[in-house]
Image (spheres, rainbow, N blue to C red):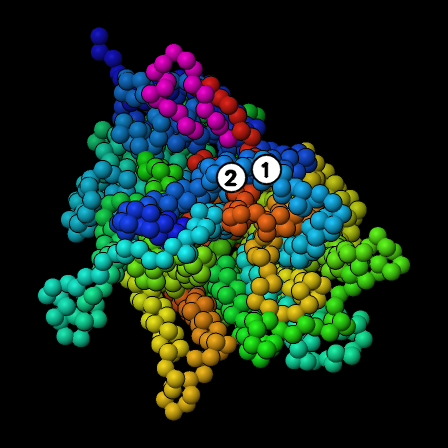
Amino acid sequence: MLLGAMFGFKVAVGTGNPWLGLLVAMLAGGMLSLLHAVVTINFQADQVVSGLATNFVGIGLSLVLGEGLSKAGTTALLPNWTVPGLSAIPILGPILFTNQSILVYFGYLLTPAVAFYINRTRPGMHLRAVGEYPSAADALGINVYRLRYLYVFIGGLLAGLAGATISLAISPGWFSELTTAGQGWIAIGIVIFAQWNPWRALAGAYMFGALRRLILDLQGPTMLLWFENPFRAQSPGFFLQMLPYALTIIILVIGSRSAMKKRVGAPAALGLPYVRGERGR
Amino acid sequence: MATNDTLAKGFRPTYSLRLERRLTTPKWLPVATSVGAVVVALIVGALLIYLGGGHPLAAYQHILEAAFGSVGVFNDTLVKATPLILVGLACALAFRMRLWNIGAEGQFFMGAWGASAVVLLPLLPATTPKPLMLLAMALAGFLCGALWGFIPGYLKAKLNVNEVVTTLMMNYIATSWVLFWVFGAWSEGGFQMSRMFPRTAWMPRLLDYAKSIPAFGGLTLHGGILLGLIAATIVWFIVSRSKWGYEIRLIGDNPRAAHYAGINIVRNTVLVMMLSGGLAGLAGMSEISGVVHRLQGAISPGYGFTGIIVAWLAKLNPFAVVLVSVLFGGLILAGREIQPSGIPRMLQGIILFCVIASDVLLRYRVRLVRS
Amino acid sequence: MPQIVNAVEMRGIVKRFPGVLANDHVDFDLCQGEVHALLGENGAGKSTLMNVLAGLYKPEEGAISVEGKRVSFNSPRDAIAAGLGMVHQHFMLVPSQTVTENIILGLEAPRFVLNMAELDKKILALQEQYGLRVDPKAKIWQLSVGEQQRVEILKMLYRGARVLILDEPTAVLTPQEIKEFIATLKGMVASGHSIVFISHKLDEVLAIANRVTVLRHGRATASGVSTAGTTKRKLAELMVGRDVIFFLEKPPATPGPVVLDLQDLKAENDRGLQALKGVSLQVRAGEILGIAGVAGNGQSELAQVITGMRKALSGHVRVNGEDVVNRSPRVAINRQVAHVPEDRNGVGSAPSLSLAENLIMKSYRKAPVGSRLALNRSVIRKQAEELKTAFDIAAPNIDVQARLLSGGNLQKAILAREMSAEPKIIVAVQPTRGLDVGAIEAVQRVLLDERARGTAILLFSEELEEVMALSDRIAVIYEGQIMGEVKPEETTLEQIGLMMAGQRLENIRGETDGHE
């Protein structure tokens, strides 16, 4: 994600074309994820540790290549757009369809598309099977290794896209690690909270979006109701900054509790390497 | 595994790599793979530096000189290694039980905060005798770190909440918490740091004894390294020799078998996370009492994260943690002067990748087979 | 000249695993429209041979032809395309998906969007054709084991498999279900299918198969012998390599007082469904109470509740009069309740710890193994060496990782550990499953020795013959309830089979009494 943010911005600054930036950002995310894929799928390394290593490399690489980029100023950003027709809908129209970044609309479309793909299509069914019980899929001739590579790569593409969303649209620019500020990890929290359901993940993501907005708004005004706004001062402002992270922990607790009760949740083979014909594991 | 039909059409026999499960692992192999992984990582790093337009050999030579070139810089390397030892031990202990404590960084900050609170709140007056003051600071640091380990540990044990995410989130909360105090109540004249600690809160350093032993002049190595060595011995005893360590290893290897053996997994999870957090907290205390002598936002160049790599590279062996920490202390020290600044971070990531990838060699024999 | 083309022909198959030669130049052929049994002990290489045929493993040497054509399978997909379908012993079904989803998994069609309603209909039609009924919309985890087996077979038929390979298909069925199953197989043969039937049960092989191939230690000791011209005894000898004692010598029981008293136990399984619906049993010192039943009827849960590993909703577990229900595994250990768990690898051992470390799992807390803080390493080593010799555990040394032990030796190690605590009660769950004859005998002997020593033993087993041979009394469990309790010398397989299928003893007796 960070790598995506960096590459997206760098390429956009370099070429003046934000679309090219977006593309390169996704590819960068995808390439980095392939590293993770090689180590976990071929070398059967622990996926948590490998994920951490991926993070270190991603952060390091973006710091190295993003050197000096924070002074680059601004560049051509992705366009905002108002949907004709839909924006005329009362209440919802101005909120959802007016002057939003093109990527916001992409987000609208992606969720139902992913939900449909996973639950209602053949490759989606294969995806679920490989996640739940890879040997069953393998016995029916589904190439477990190839699918795992593919989806790790797609995951990397999307994470790269997410990074570029920040650096090219939401809060343009490059501010080293602070650009993403742990949002990739928050996303993991959201997925667990959502119990791997794209719609619930969408709800979770918008909840966090709202929270960020609220934090910014709270730091603005001098008066809050009848009191002097304590959050305008720099020091208490740090309490507000803790909120998204604290909330992540809270939703994780909620998500884990209901997962325990309903006994649903993570795909059964999450985190497990697959080795065909392994004996005595 | 990788048979290629198009190649097979030719007359030349094709070769493919095949993995075979090892029945036994020789004792020298883990050491060899760790060293090999570092070497490979250095080569990959060199390649990347070269591609980035740098001079890899010059960079490495620079790292070597800047870290181990003289008594003076070696002293600095050991100073950097001190927090790494404690944090590395914290991670090694938790990883033994397959608890992914990624929160050492936050526990480090909380430890530093707790130690500072003794001086700055103040809990003890500045005139407190040095041993008592240091003991109180160490205790406070340990406890605050342990608290930061307790929360994710409890959530994991009782509610099965993923500890990777919670410990990470706790990192961000800890840094914000420290900043809140540094920018607010403890700010010295509006600067983003606290006032200097009184001398009674300073860990003894080698240079303090320069009057009697002149060779120690200018050497900033402080008592924290002793803390680290003692901690390494204790952790080694716990893991390898004690009943509790047996329980930890059993849970780490197969939690269901541990349950079957009548081991209380909930209690052990919480305890191990607390001890792990406490060790990282102690690192924070040692750093501000031995080096920084005040609380400020920038007290760690990512010690907590480097500790993860240290633990992994040391194959979770406490004494190996000490050695690897010295190596990484040098890397961090040298890294401060290397431009661009992201290189050490990236190098650490690559080393970790190589280490975990090389683990496959411990479990499998790689063979070249003709097909 | 007309010639019968073999459906499958395997010649000189060699397959190695690290440290094991699983198939050593094995020949096997299958005629059109026959049932060919592949007989052998656990670990003889039957499943390996068939996994080679199903494309899951690639053989090092040997040739395979299907319907006269040479084939070389790179993946199961190739085998399926050639008309071979394998039903594995451990079902290859995705638990969270529906029957229909599992059946169409991996197929080219439909290409992208799934029209579930239409697919369900197709599956129903197929079910009608073969008389294999199961709700297409049900999720796999909701089905009984027998139903899951039907899904597996339907899966292969849907793919147009002409050759079905069934790996130990009857292991999960009651005697009555087995009869039904045999009828289904006959029907499939009649409609032109050929069947490979993997088994280690002699009676079944003789009842179902036209021909039989016997494997021992990876080699074929008999290839394609007609079942009409052979006997159970001869097959057993081919399978084991020596005369087989079918019955163990068992001295008469001398039952003492009730040591283990279970009262109205109720408990849930991992999915939150009620697995025990009021189980009451008593076990006396010096007797073996066998629990018969088809897998998944609450046996695992019952064993776990007794040993403190699972919480009961209600009821009592009294050990020598003391109620220990819902305490903890540690309390059970302290009361000298030994537990030979069903899952040797997943529960009974720690794979990466050494044999010696695995042997102290229950004894490390107390002297002489453990002192106040530390472990006494010399005592651990000495005890481990002694147990290794006493229980004949074949391992290079006591420092070898547990995962490298064979199933039989791992089970011996677990028994060694549990018996060294001088138990008052033993809860043994499927203690001989998956072992070869030598190990089975060793395990059974240990249990009988303990019985002679005055230990109360609760033996869970799916092998009816084993339950009949070892038990002093037999209780049959079905859907978390005890259907009845009988003495082995006063009952028949028929009667136990009916109870395993859910009929209460009183009803069965009532019926037979009515006829008389």
Please tell me which residue lies in front, A242 or C241: A242
* Amino acid residing under circle 2: Gly
Q: CA distance from mark 1 to mark 2?
A: 9 Å
Tag 1 subunit? B
Q: Amino acid at mark 1?
A: Ala
Q: Position of residue A224 (x, y in %)?
A: 38, 86
Q: Given the current orientation, which residue lies at the most extreme right position? A: B212
**Spot occupied by residue C442 in the image (x, y as percentages of width and height):** 62, 39
Are the residues under marks 1 and 2 on the same chain? yes
The secondary structure type at the circle numbered 2 is loop
Taking the image as shown, residue B81 lies to the left or right of residue C174, namely: right
Residue A136 visible in the picture: no
Question: Which of the pair C129/B105 is nearer the observer?
Answer: B105
| Mark 2 lies on residue | B54
Taking C287 as reference, is A72 left or right? left
Q: Name the residue: 66% across, 69% down.
A: B294
Residue A97 image point, x, y percent: 18, 66
Q: Toward which corner of the image does residue A186 lie, by quadrant?
A: bottom left
Q: Which residue is drawn at the image coordinates 19% and 61% (left, top)?
A: A81
Q: Is residue A115 left or right of residue B120?
A: left
Left/right of residue C249 with respect to residue A180 in the rendered view: right
Q: Is residue A172 above or below residue A210?
A: above
Region of the chain picked out in magenta, as a range = B1-19
Q: Residue furthest bottom?
A: A226
Q: In the rendered image, which residue does mark 1 sit on?
A: B58
Q: Label 2: chain?
A: B
Q: Is residue B105 visible?
A: yes
Give me the residue at 75% from left, 56% from top. B221
Residue C516: x, y in percent? 36, 53
Secondary element at image label 1:
helix
Tell me the residue at 21%/31% (across/down).
C191
Q: Contact (CB < 8 A) between labels 1 and 2?
A: yes
